[in-house]
Image (cartoon, grey):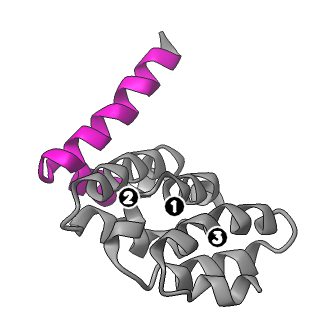
Amino acid sequence: AIARCVVDPSLAVRACVVSTLSAVAVHDEQWAIDQFKQLLQADDKLLKTHYVEEFLARGLREHIGDYRSIIDRMLLSEIDDARQAGGRLACLARLYHPELDDLSEVAMSGESACRLGATEVAKTKALLNF
């Protein structure tokens, strides 16, 4: 049933399925990631949902290899909210993976939505260290 929803033509259905995949990931992480990647083979509007951002954020530390191309796609999206989320995720990924300077650099030197996302991570980190 989940696999059918992953390829549903409705973006609303796909967005809702992301939260289900988050729960499935607790038991079968790789299957959930594979389904998530298939689910994202749709319009970029899906990339701006908080469901997608949360799924990616939860797995950044362990699964950056699976998620790097998705974050790159978000940073290049024509949708401001997707680029902003991509900026947040790029900088968060850099905190976990120092070798990802290039990814965070794209966010920090990109257009305004990317930079805004990047500054949100910097602001949160600064407040946590204060």
| Amino acid at circle 1 | Val
Question: Up-down: is 80 above or below 74?
Answer: above
Q: Residue at x 78, y 61 (%)?
A: 23
Q: Which mark is residue 17?
A: 3
Place of residue 3 in the rendered image (x, y in percent of width and height, measured from the top left) = 70, 88
Label located before the other in sequence (1 or 3): 3
Residue 96 can be seen, yes or no: yes
Task: From the image, tell me which residue sits under label 1.
Answer: 52
Label 3 – label 2 distance at C-alpha:
15 Å
Front of the two marks 1 and 3: 3
Question: Which residue is most to the top?
Answer: 130
The location of residue 4, given as percent across then percent down, is 67, 90
Q: Position of residue 129 (x, y in %)?
A: 50, 16
Q: Residues within 10 Å of mark 1 (few under 14, many from 20)?
A: many
Q: For label 2, count other residues whose C-alpha is less than 10 Å away and answer few (under 14), some (14-19) or many (20+).
A: many
Q: Secondary structure at mark 1?
A: helix
**Circle 2: element type:** helix
**Residue at (83%, 74%) from the top-left corner?**
28
Location of the N terminus by quadrant is bottom right
Gap in Å between the C-alphas at discs 1 and 2?
Answer: 7 Å
**Mark 3 vs 2, N-terminal side:** 3
Figure label count: 3
Name the secondary structure under disc 3: helix
User: Circle 2 is placed at which residue position?
Assistant: 48
Q: Nearer the viewer, residue 20 or 123?
A: 20
Q: Are marks 1 and 2 in contact (CB under 8 Å)?
A: yes
Q: CB of mark 3 within 8 Å of CB of mark 2?
A: no
- Amino acid found under the numbered disc labelled 3: Val
What segment is highlighted magenta in the picture? 101-128
As drawn, 73 above or below 117: below
Amino acid tagged 2: Lys
